[in-house]
Amino acid sequence: MISRRDFLQAAVAASAVYGASGVGNWARLAAQQALTQDQLLNFDTFGNVTLIHVTDIHGQLKPLWFREPEINLGVGAVNGLPPHVTGQDFLKMFNLAPGTPHAYALSHVDFVSLARAYGKMGGLDRVASVVNAIRSDRPDALLLDGGDTWHGSYTCLKTQAQDMVNVMNALKPDAMTSHWEFTLGIDRVTEIVEGLDFPFLGANVFDAEWDEPAYEPYKMFDRGGAKIAVIGQAFPYMPIANPGWMFPGLSFGVREERMAEVVAEVRDAGADLVVVLSHNGFDTDRKMAAQVPGIDVILTGHTHDALPEPVLVGKTMLIASGSNGKFVTRLDLDVQNGQLLGFRHKLIPVFSDVIEPDAEMASLIDEQRAPYKAELDEVLGTTDSLLYRRGNFNGTWDDLICNALIDEREADIALSPGFRWGPSLLPGDPITREDVFNATSMSYPNAYRSEMTGEMLHVILEDVADNLFNPDPYYQQGGDMVRVGGMGYQIDVSKPQGSRITNMTLLKTGEVIDPSKTYVVSGWASVNEGTEGPPIWDVVETYVKRMGTVHVDPNKSVKVVGA
Amino acid sequence: MDFTRRGVLAVGAGVAATLMLPVRGAMAATEDKIAAFTGGAATGTGGITLTSPEIAENGNTVPIEVDAPGAVSILVLAAGNPTPDVCTFGFGPLSGAQRASTRIRLAGTQDVIAVAKMADGSFVRAQNTVKVTIGGCGG
């Protein structure tokens, strides 16, 4: 595992004047045991260019709980490297004291009690206050949105993302890239994109038929006397990981050669600074940074990682700004004559009880939600367990969903996709309809019920595991591991595809899964067109109402080895 | 240009179970095909670029491109297909570039191999793994 010392030395080695990060400020805040908006936003303006990065907001307009992962394994070369460091190891690596606000914001350690102490995070009205404060320091700061913005909530689903479009338009980003946006269907995406005041970038999005670029690859900005190229990189595995039939004319892919071409093109056009606004995921970006020369900054997304310091790969700086509006990154840069001379970085945690909401944005958000208020607020039940999703393997939210699928759909085994989005709920919290949609909202929600052989189940688990644990990040296509209800298994993450998954066991009988036997399996979010079944939120709502109070025991049926 | 589509598996639900099983016969057949193309000569690396997606968006139609400046012909094989032959591109003396692209069908995760015969009679080889996956679970 890389030590903090190695990490800092790598940073220092890049340039003698390479700057400071905001961690030190956090530590001081912690010592004072007090948080104020001024302290959170305090930043000694530096250089001539400011980038503001938000990503993976997933439709979340209001403050929320979001527990960071307890398990986030890295395989191969990235084993033990950030972001594959969690819990106490994470706190040690970044020198953060347990129990402090930053420990709460950035790790799962002691999450429930710290959540009660420090409150919810995010809320786009608070994010607006942060952005406004940065713009008052640096009026021409670039605000860049890494995508997964037009998806993830009840109102986003009901308005086909118009709520997010309205709110983000008021925030005035300078560019965005995309992933879940395309699950609105290509017609709706086109309709929205045509009305945007800022570019929807995707250098790696091509017309599938003619193999021609489908969207603007980059946008050039003049800022602080420098030319800044912002290149967009959409999620590479869109038609594989999500339903390709919703955007049939488009082809994606990492397309490393294309990125190299575009970087060369913008350099030839006089770019002093090359920024990639990416939805690749952190490990893919780390590889791309090593393979493609000439990128100064990659603003990473997709994998929802929040890192309090940039990660340097050669001369490229990787920034990880978290998800769900929980953080805003401010990156000040000194760019002179085509050279990045220094930086100052701060991952600003959006403590919703500390940062004053922007009044205009708050009323705009309320306006989006007003028509749906009664449905959103309806309490369906209560949880007496912490409900969370994020992590490589089963989280309690998905265990609840799997329990609902098994009960309501009379299945032996349930499968719930390893999405990274979905906020948390604390023990004792009411479960509202809004909460259920925050964990399930999507455009292909049908809860199927079908028969599968044990062999087929094994193939599926092996396939998904390879999408997460293939040692080459360019071959990792998707989210976290598929969550399984009613069945236990062992996974050796160090093995190749086909031999990672063993000891598959039907939990209700304790029997080993028979490859030739048929089991009733229920799941949701199939990428196949024409999948039949009720929407998953109805299944979960019925179950929660019937249970009244839900209780989810810690899942002990997945055994992980080889990490 | 010869296209051989004989015996290629239909990619559908039924093929999922064979996704990761290399077809041993086909692997040996691939080496035989290369030997027949090169006459048993050794193959070098460099001077040939094979571009393919890391993960196929649709295993039934996977775009690939080969580029080998100075080549007279380029053999393309899909090592994991029941019949590995894909095609052989020939380039005459008036060819402006020795580059070609096509779309191929892949029965499952496998290596795509390109071998170029250069004007001086030497051979160079490139190969990429293309993953064919069930899909879903997109973060």
Image (cartoon, rainbow, N blue to C red):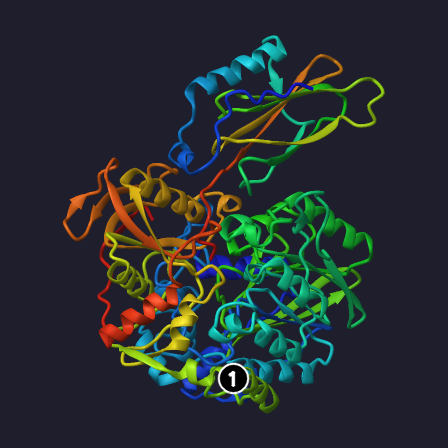
Q: Is residue B14 left or right of residue A203?
A: left
What quarter of the picture does the N terminus of chain B occupy?
Answer: top right
According to the picture, the residue beneath numbered tag 1 turns out to be A371
Residue at 56% across / 31% down in the picture?
Answer: B105
As rendered, which of A525 and A480 lies closer to the eye? A525
Q: Amino acid at mark 1?
A: Pro
Task: Tell me how many marks there are.
Answer: 1
Q: Crowdedness of circle 1 by 10 Å Cα count: few (<14), some, many (20+)?
A: few
- Specify the quadrant of the image occupied by residue A402: bottom left
Apparent side of residue A79 relative to residue A196 in the rendered image (left or right): left
- A265, above or below A534, in the image: above
Nearer to the camera, A272 or A203: A203
Q: Is residue B99 above or below residue A157?
A: above
Residue B6 quadrant: top right
x and y, in percent, of residue A33 in the image: 40, 87
Q: Give whichever of A149, B67 is nearer the camera.
A: A149
Q: Chain of mark 1?
A: A
Q: Quadrant of residue B99?
A: top right
Q: Is residue A372 visible?
A: yes
State the residue lying farthest toward the top. B39
Secondary structure at badge 1 equals helix
Above or below A424: residue A521:
above
As drawn, which residue projects farthest toward the right?
B94
